[in-house]
Amino acid sequence: MTAVDESELTSVSPAQLVIVRKPALYERASIQLLSAAVLLALGGGAWRIRSAALRKRSTLLEQMVEEKAGDLTLANRELAEANEELARAKEALEEANRDLDQIASTDLLAFVVSDLLSRHLIGKDRLFFDFLRSLSPGPGPFDVRNLPVA
């Protein structure tokens, strides 16, 4: 390229044009460093906020777990007590059944013997049987006072 002035004279040396442009604001090193620092600070702050929220949630969940564990322990204790009570009731029922079986068999035997004796006793023997009946100890397996005499 050659330079020409108003009189149309050309210069012998080549023309040079120096253009100086100021960098845009975002292109400056100080702004780029400041932006990086702000981004790091924002990231660190967000991380700290998230970590605090997670710790709070973790504490809340631990409290809930402890509460539920306490409820389960109480429920297990109540269940064990109910099982023990059922076992005692079962044992009492079995014992009552054994007693009833014994009483029933003894009363039935006493009734049969009483009936047989009363049918075959006469006179003094019958009086002796009535005397024995009057000596019966009261309600129980050997109570023969209320048995009918044929």
Image: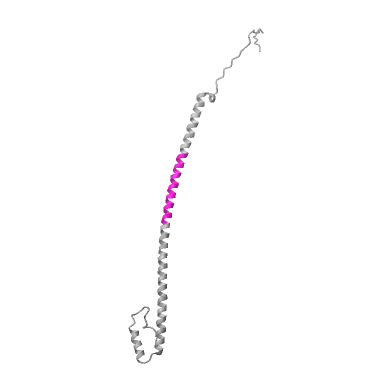
Relative depth, front residue between 85 and 64:
85
User: Is 21 left, or right, of 99 in this rendering?
Assistant: right
Examine the residues drawn in magenta and state their main secondary structure: helix
Q: How is the image coloured?
A: one colour
Residue at x 40%, y 77% (from the top left corner):
103
User: Could you tell me which residue is drawn at 40 percent across and 69 percent down?
Assistant: 92
In the rendered image, residue 98 lying in the magenta stretch gets the answer no
User: Which residues lie in the magenta part?
Assistant: 50-74
**Magenta stretch containing residue 53, yes or no?**
yes
Height in image: 30 above or below 73? above
Q: Say which quarter of the image contains residue 146.
A: bottom left
x and y percentages locating residue 29 in the rendered image: 51, 24
28 with respect to 125 (left or right):
right
For the N terminus, the image quarter is: top right
Judged from this view, the residue extending furthest toward the bottom is 123
Please name whichever residue, 53 or 126, is drawn nearer the observer in this view of the structure.
126
Q: Picture coordinates of residue 133 (x, y %)?
A: 35, 84
Residue 14 vs 139, above or below: the answer is above
Between 37 and 84, the residue placed more toward the observer is: 84
